[in-house]
Amino acid sequence: MNDSPSTDGQPARPTRDCRPRLLGVVVAVVFVLYTLMLGWSAYRHSPIADEPAYLASGVSHWKHGHFELCKVSPPLVRLVAAIPVVLAGAELDQDAVPLHSRHRMEHLAGREFAKANSERAFWLFTLGRWACLPFAWLGAWICFSWGKQLYGAGAGLASLILWCFSPSVLAHAQMLNADVGVTALSLATCYLFWRWSRAPQLPLALAAGATLGLALLAKTNAIVLPPVIVLASLIHGYAQPQRQVVLRLRHLALAFLVSLYVINWGYGFAGSFTRLGDFRFFSKTFVGDASPGSQFRLNGPIWDSIPVPLPAPMVEGMDLQKVDFENSRGRIRTYLSGQWYDHSWWWYYLYVVAVKVPIGTWVLVITGSAIWAMGRTPGRLEVGCFVVLPAVALFLPACLQTGFGAGIRYVMPAFPFVFLLAGSVFCMRASKVWLGVGAAALVLGPIASLRTYPHSLCYFNVLAGGPNHGHFHLIDSNMEWGQNLLYVDEWVKSHADESPKVAQWSFYPIEDYGVEFTEPTIEEDKPIPPGTYLISVNYLRGNPDMRRMPLRRFLELVPDERIAYTTYVYHIPER
């Protein structure tokens, strides 16, 4: 309430400050628009490479109560995604999928799921995607709430907008993979520990520990959080007038015990506290120079008898994931700037974010980081402990995995923390110059993102040439991941008179979904026959493992049309 003076010297009647109400309306509008965008994208896009395996595994978890499928990733997100799918009566022939195998059987289960449900599978994937929207909402709300508490309402709104209109968040939040789930839960974990560190109370510590357990149940890259939280809490707590070191350590120990309980509960306590000596590992990280299938590298009577306080499928999954990351045989290829490699580099993900993040967002991030580094915003230490440190910790491990380079989703858990830093540009103490720069950048970022929507996975910023030139820089999960099958199918049906020949990339056979295309027959040493051709950019760029190398010849031609940025249309005339 504000009291403004009247012209006759008497106090005027109090007037209500409309700014909080206006802020609430703006936040509600952003949330509604964000939800509608995600819901529509989830409906319009076909299953991407990993989704059939994830959804089939989630259905198997619920129906058969085991976690043998998809051990490489924890089960929380796919369990959530599978709830409406199981209720809808999805079919899965469990007998066709051998469970006890050293090989990963989840992709076979995904194909069986696609075959069993055929065209109905598209609707089942939509249901699973919609069920995962609460993870995206959680990330949006924490961005707004934490940004507001750190720097004021303007900063909170800016952080919210950056989250909701980030092309990468839009692309992956409408999928049922685990990346946005672990991103949102990691952010929520650090937010709760930040609140606890400011005023240590046991209920808050226990809630933070439970959230940490959920983050680790979403994806194992959250495993960097416990040491980060301990370090951040001790540094921040030591700077407080009442340090309460013993109390803080006791609370942290109880919080981590709660997180361990949540993790084991999420797996139904499957193989919990199995002795270390009973595991057989396959990654060099765990076996060292020993042959695959050996015991832990530090084996011995003492080590072998140690009970591992984690579910056995989770431990085995971390080992399988390390096998992929090590890529010792160069089986997994990395594409960068028109070339294929059998390895990656420490700077690979820096390149990925350089071309995949909007320029407006980069301006805000750089400006906000400079303001924080110069101490122009309040709470410099606590922001460094609970925002900057987690951002670095969640980004750096991906850079250290140089066996292969993958999608931006591997470093996306760092994004919301960076959005909080970017929001500091709108701190109440900021100068008009900072505010002007920030406002312009905040407008440009969403505009650039919306120009590509709903094909947000294909977004590349203007300096990279935009989505039409994105496949020069990166492909696969950064560009085409099988998401545009429905768009291509609609184009083919509307141009049936042209009898188009289609090379549409898909991790699973397209016919499993009830979609049929006529494949092109192109020979390396002969002219391309006349006709209409639709070629996916993954084939244009010619992954050697795909054995479709003749299709690279189309890269020398100018396409007549582009379908959803990922499928190029060529009309080859009669000679």
Image (tube, grey):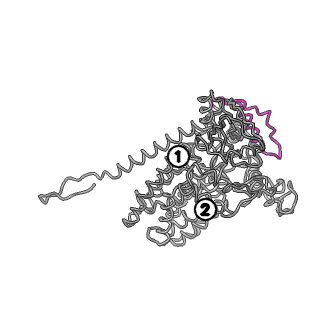
Tell me residue 555's x, y (percent).
67, 47
- Is residue 247 among the parts visible in the rendering? no
Q: Secondary structure at mark 1?
A: helix
The residue wearing badge 1 is 452
Indicate the amino acid at tag 2.
Leu
Q: Secondary structure at mark 2?
A: helix
Circle nearer the N terminus (2, 1) = 2
Dot label at residue 252: 2
Q: Is residue 39 left or right of residue 119?
A: left
* Residue at image location 88% in from the left, 58% down from the top: 291
Indicate the amino acid at tag 1.
Thr
Q: Is residue 112 magenta?
A: yes
Q: Can you tell which quarter of the image residue 323 is in? A: bottom right
Tell which of 281 and 373 is nearer to you. Answer: 373
Point out the image quarter for the C terminus.
top right
* Residue at image location 68% in from the left, 64% down from the top: 346
* Residue at image location 74% in from the left, 57% down from the top: 341
Tell me residue 366's x, y (percent).
50, 65
